[in-house]
Image: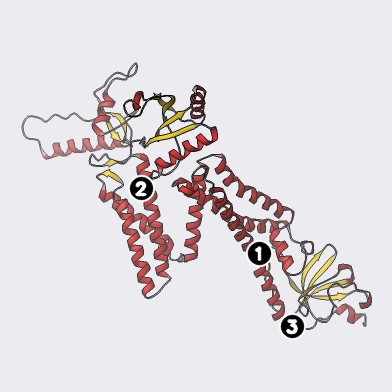
Amino acid sequence: MLALVEVRGEHRDHDQAEQEFEHRGWPVVTSSPRGQGASAGVLSAALASRFYCVEVRLFGARNRRTERAAAWRVQRLAKAARLEMYVRRCDLVDRDREQLTEWQVHTVSHRPTLRPAPGPMTVSARLRRRWLMVRARYTERRGRHDTGSLVTGTASEARRLSRMAMPEGAPGRTDIDVRALHGRERSSIVQRREEAGTRRVYRLAAWLLAMTFCAVLAHHHTGFRRWLWGAVAVACFAAGLRIGSTMFASGGRALSVLVSCVAAVLFLGAALGWISPDAQVWSPEQMVVLGAVTLTVVGIWLLVRQWTWGEWLAWAAPLAFTAVGSFVVASGSVLHALYADGLGLTPEDLEVPGIWQALSAAKLLGFLSLALFAPAAWGIVKHVHAPFARPGEHLSVPLYVLAQTMVIVQVAGLAADSAGRAVDAVKAAAVRREEPPPYFGVEPEWTCVEPTVPIARLNVQGGELRAERPYLSFGVAGGMVSLWNTDTEEPLKLPAGQVRLLPAQDSRSACEFPHRERAGV
């Protein structure tokens, strides 16, 4: 953006403003006192005021708020530097780069010089001449006669550039020609500028993703809803095709339509299982997750590329939270702690192998990755220059903190829900006398508990042991055996040295102890 900035004050204020511009990498194009230079005859003269034509460089989308975004940054600079500074005008500077066709230079001395003989040419002579020319063109396209030079431009420009003499270099030549480096040159096709073409590709991808999502919803519904979502999918495809058909500034419309249709078929084929007979149709939940992941990746990239302290805080805070969570998981699994708490146990009562703690840590980090959604959304709104996210806005920090807090609470809820569902499944299996499901290395199993000391000396915590019935055992940890008592729905703990644990043959049958029978007990 080219901004006309007025700085009022003494000479030291003007010098400070120039230093601030240089510190932020904003080149000063021109500067003059007010009423002189560009403002002559436009504004009244003032000795204590100076105009600067500054090139304000910023990241973000090119939309109707881009000029305001540049003005916001100058206003923030004025507040931070405590200068009386005003933005009097902002103009958009378009420096998008043109995409020139690349051409490879090659010699033409290998081409046959068959001059027509006097009189009419025979059929065999014509065929021979055509064959020699085809072979020469083929060897040229294979790169066997390249000179190693590369030129860019239109076809006529490239041919003239290849034949001209280089300053203090190769002399001019007339025995060379050029060939397009990527396919054949079409004079009717003019590519768009680089950033403009990239923006159209992104918009096409967004419309095709929306079309795929609506197509998946139509596949999973029936009746009126199927037709409704199908119509929306067709509308999204039409909008994407409208953008895709104008990928080139001129010409190439048929090629653009073909590429857009092929991309749409690939999107639909991947989501609806057309690519492989064994492929499954995606569910709407999977499409939502895919969209969330895509938005998160895009938003984080847009946030990081801006690279200011505010964005660094928004990016580093979730990473720090994730790192702290990883440290907690390394010292003792959070999911295992929640699981043990739901059963009335402590993490020390569960002997979990390290590999399973690492896997539970990976699952927890998967939950924590959702915390990146808030800074990703922040990066997107900053990219589009939303007014509530402008630099220096007082509501921006509370809004971000509120959004991040909500996401972290949701992450905690997901972790608690994962452990809670596992606890409920174990309790239900204990009541029905079925095999309980494992949970990240914790594998409860039906066990017969045989006391090795008299019952009176048995140190039981949490109830009374009934040796004739099987118990769900969570293993031995810290010299203690942890069991689940279905009568009280509480854990039962007793020293491992006072009992002998035997696998239960049947969870619904009474336990039998061969050692006690042989001893006549």
Tell whether label 2 touches label 1 (CB within 8 Å): no
Q: Which amino acid does label 1 sit on?
A: Ala
What's the CA distance linking mark 2 and mark 3?
67 Å
Tell whether label 3 touches label 1 (CB within 8 Å): no
The mark found on residue 16 in the picture is none
For the N terminus, the image quarter is: top left
Residue picked out by circle 3: 508
Tell me the mark number nearer the camera, choosing from 1 and 3.
Answer: 1
Q: In this view, does 162 lie above or below 508?
A: above
- Residue at the spot x=46%, y=28% of the render? 8
Label 3: state its secondary structure. Answer: loop
Q: Residues within 10 Å of mark 3 (few under 14, many from 20)?
A: few
Q: In this view, does 3 lie to the left or right of 242?
A: right
Q: Is residue 75 left or right of residue 431?
A: left
The mark found on residue 200 in the picture is 2
- Residue at the spot x=74%, y=56% of the render? 332
As rendered, which of 289 and 10 lies closer to the eye? 10
